[in-house]
Image: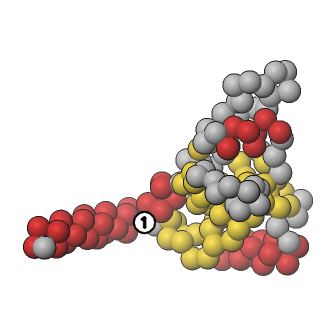
Amino acid sequence: MSKSNVNIQNKKAWHDYEILDRVEAGIQLMGTEIKSIRAGKAGLVDSYCVFEVEQLYVVGMHVAEYSFGSYYNHAAKRTRKLLLHRRELDRLAVKVKNTGLTLVPLRLYINDKGLAKLEIALAKGKKSYDKRDSLKQKDDKREMDRAMKEFR
């Protein structure tokens, strides 16, 4: 298989949450959905993961309708099942239920075997002053990088 260039990121999650742990999950997709993802027509903004009847689902993930699809086309914002081992599901369910953490999708990509994978993170919400501090650190780092380039 050739190397895929599909790498859709959820930049808002890095701003709104403190990332504690990451897990790679498969996604149960329809045929037209994978074709749309391979074309890069997907978005993770405002999406989140939820447990229902001991299964994990991603809600709010936007996958644009496939332009060459017929009446078999999919709904753009449907709830999609995530594929994880039972042990991983149980571990995540305990952490979400007991500690008040949340599961957010960080990245959607196609792996070397041609399968769509979703990188989800166990995250803790940031307060507004933490968000401002993160932006300040990011700006400071950018300024230092600019100064180093000028120095060379």
The image position of residue 81, as x and y in percent, is 82, 53
Q: Is residue 52 left or right of residue 18?
A: right
Protein image colouring: secondary structure
Q: Is residue 69 left or right of residue 141?
A: right
Q: Is residue 53 left or right of residue 67?
A: right
Q: Which residue is mark 1?
A: 127
State the SS at label 1.
loop
Q: Is residue 129 visible?
A: no
Q: Quadrant of the C terminus?
A: bottom left
Who's the residue at 42% across and 65% down the image?
Answer: 127
Q: Could you classify mark 1 by the number of other residues whose Cα lies within 10 Å: few (under 14), some (14-19), or many (20 or more)? A: few
Place residue 146 in its image quadrant: bottom left
The image position of residue 8, as x and y in percent, is 57, 51
Who's the residue at 68% across and 55% down the image?
Answer: 2
Q: Is residue 104 left or right of residue 30?
A: left
Q: Looking at the image, which is closer to me, 131 or 14?
A: 14
Q: How many marks?
A: 1
Place residue 68 in its image quadrant: top right
Amino acid on which disc 1 is placed: Lys
Q: Is residue 6 visible?
A: yes
Residue occupying the far front of the picture: 2
The image position of residue 77, as x and y in percent, is 70, 37
Q: Is 120 rendered above or below residue 90?
A: above
Q: Quadrant of the N terminus?
A: bottom right
Residue occupying the far left of the picture: 151
Residue occupying the far top of the picture: 71
Place residue 66 in its image quadrant: top right
The image position of residue 63, as x and y in percent, is 67, 39
Q: Looking at the image, which is closer to me, 107 or 100?
A: 107
Who's the residue at 22% across and 69% down the image?
Answer: 145
